């Protein structure tokens, strides 16, 4: 609802917007509020704002990797570009609104983060997921190869949970393995590599045509 003085304009029920997944994803609700505010400030018509947000799907076509949710054969795949503690916390909280008999994640951490931050990301993963596949940073420019996964493993161990952990250097292989092992009723969170690489991988997993997204952009952070 947009309110100014005594005038109120009801635009939509937040649950109507596809990107909020029925109003369950709080940070997308916050993004919607920001978008409405921006459109209002630009003096767009309420109908343009309303139709634009209703048309925005938040899927592989118009917002790949920004908490993309795909449900297929009773399994839920969430693809999110969560690369720091705050983003991971928000993503974890959002996934909790989706029912699942078990939860898995494929995750890495950027090399230029503080050691304590990488360890904390590992701890957060252990607290939220039953199975975690951790990957290695491809470039190896800021830390020796294996350092990131070692720090993530330390964080997972510090949580003292029964989380099942596997270390697979290649992001692509980690995604393939996690998807193969995902059972009906379970949820898998995949942290993105580069967006074109991620779209192509997810498209391949689901038998979709991802060619239109292109593959020329190199992976900037996580191994192929």
Image: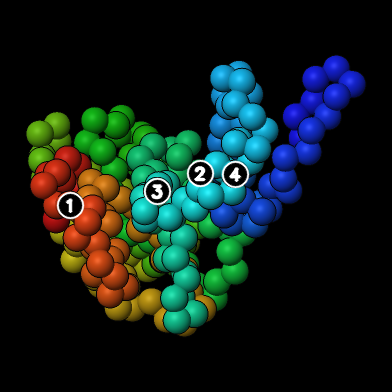
Q: Which of the marked residues, 2 or 4, is nearer the chain's N terminus?
A: 4
Left or right of residue 32, residue 206 in this image: left
Question: Which residue is identified by label 4?
Answer: 51
Binning the other alpha carbons within 10 Å of mark 3 as few (below 14), some (14 to 19) or many (20 upward) gives few
Q: CA distance from mark 2 to mark 1?
A: 30 Å
Q: CA distance from mark 4 to mark 3?
A: 15 Å
Q: Which of the marked residues, 2 or 3, is nearer the chain's N terminus?
A: 3
Residue 148 found in image quarter: top left
Question: Which residue is identified by label 2?
Answer: 89
Q: Which of the marked residues, 4 or 3, is nearer the chain's N terminus?
A: 4
On screen, residue 209 above or below 51: below
Residue drawn at x 68%, y 53% as measured from the top left: 15
Residue 80 percent coordinates (x, y): 40, 50
Question: Which residue is identified by label 1?
Answer: 214
SS of the residue under disc 2: helix
SS of the residue under disc 1: loop
Left or right of residue 152, residue 25 in this image: right
Q: Nearer the viewer, mark 4 or mark 1?
A: 4
């Amino acid at each position: 609802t947009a309110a100014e003085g005594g005038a109120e304009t009801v635009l939509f029920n937040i649950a109507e917007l596809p990107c909020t997944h029925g109003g369950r994803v709080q940070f997308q609700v916050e993004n919607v509020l920001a978008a409405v505010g921006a459109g209002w400030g630009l003096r767009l018509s309420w109908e343009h704002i309303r139709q634009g947000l209703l048309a925005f799907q938040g899927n592989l076509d118009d917002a790949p990797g920004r908490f993309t949710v795909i449900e297929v054969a009773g399994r839920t795949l969430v693809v999110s570009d969560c690369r720091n503690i705050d983003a991971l916390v928000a993503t974890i909280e959002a996934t909790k609104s989706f029912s699942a008999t078990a939860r898995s994640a494929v995750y890495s951490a950027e090399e230029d983060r503080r050691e304590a931050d990488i360890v904390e990301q590992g701890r957060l993963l252990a607290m939220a997921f039953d199975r975690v596949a951790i990957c290695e940073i491809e470039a190896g420019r800021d830390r020796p190869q294996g350092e990131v996964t070692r720090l993530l493993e330390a964080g997972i161990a510090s949580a003292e949970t029964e989380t099942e952990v596997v270390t697979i250097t290649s992001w692509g292989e980690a995604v393939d393995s996690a998807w193969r092992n995902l059972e009906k009723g379970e949820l898998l969170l995949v942290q993105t590599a580069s967006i074109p690489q991620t779209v192509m991988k997810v498209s391949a997993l689901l038998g979709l045509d991802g060619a239109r997204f292109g593959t020329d952009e190199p992976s900037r952070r996580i191994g192929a």
